[in-house]
Image: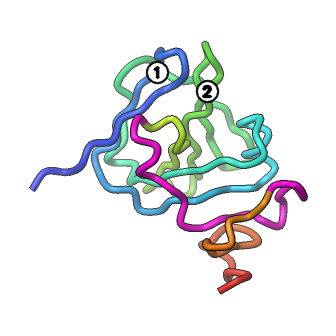
Amino acid sequence: MTNPSHEGGCLCGAIRYRAEADAVARTHCHCRSCRLAAGAPSLAWAVFPSAAFRFTRGEPTRYASSPGVTRTFCGRCGSTLTWQDDGEARTIDIASATLDAADAFAPTREIWVAEKLAWDALDPALPHYPGSSRDTQALNR
């Protein structure tokens, strides 16, 4: 059996990547840091094993957005690409919308809803977590 292969990249095409595994989680984040990084009210992530991920074209710009967190983006067009907790290097979060088959990675939970913008509606069908879904209990389940 072969591993699935998921590819994606930035707006201008300078950066491409591949994840050769299934996503281990799919989240929709409302934290302020993700909002600022994306210039959007929230940001969806597909989480993959780091060992199965690699950049296949170009080298992204890296930015330490907070202590212990590294984000990558395209230095040419600015597309947000990845987020990684340096203390949890076994996984890497890929901005879902940058995947070629983004529709296949719909979020299964909403996180950091305690920081969401008041006018950004939550999906009532998903569990909502005030912070990380690893560290807190869902508010609505």
In the rendered structure, which amino acid carries the disc numbered 2?
Answer: Ser
> For the point 90% across and 58% down, which residue is it?
118
Instruction: Answer with the quarter of the image where residue 130 lies.
Output: bottom right
Element carrying mark 2: loop
Q: Residue at x 61, y 72 (%)?
A: 126
Position in image of residue 139 (x %, y %)? 73, 81
From the viewer's side, name the closer residue of 28 and 62: 28
How is the rendered protein coloured? rainbow
Specify whether 126 is left or right of 112: left
Q: CA distance from mark 1 to mark 2?
A: 9 Å
Query: Quarter of the image holding residue 30?
Result: bottom right
Left/right placement of residue 123 relative to residue 51 reads right
Q: Is residue 20 left or right of residue 36?
A: left
Q: Secondary structure at mark 1?
A: loop
Q: Residue drawn 39% across and 31% down? A: 17
Q: Is residue 137 left or right of residue 47?
A: right
Q: Which residues are magenta?
A: 100-120
- Where residue 75 sits in the image (x, y, percent)? 61, 17
The amino acid type, in three-letter code, at marker 1 is: Ile
Q: Check residue 10 for magenta coloring.
A: no
In the image, residue 23 sits, relative to residue 111, either above or below, namely above
Image quarter of the C terminus:
bottom right
Q: Within the magenta stretch, is there residue 109?
A: yes
Location of mark 1 (residue) = 15
Report x, y in % for residue 72: 58, 33
Most extreme residue toward the bottom is: 141
* N-terminal label among 1 and 2: 1
Q: Which residue is mark 2?
A: 79
| Contact, mark 1 vs mark 2 (Cβ under 8 Å) | yes
- Which numbered marker is on residue 40? none
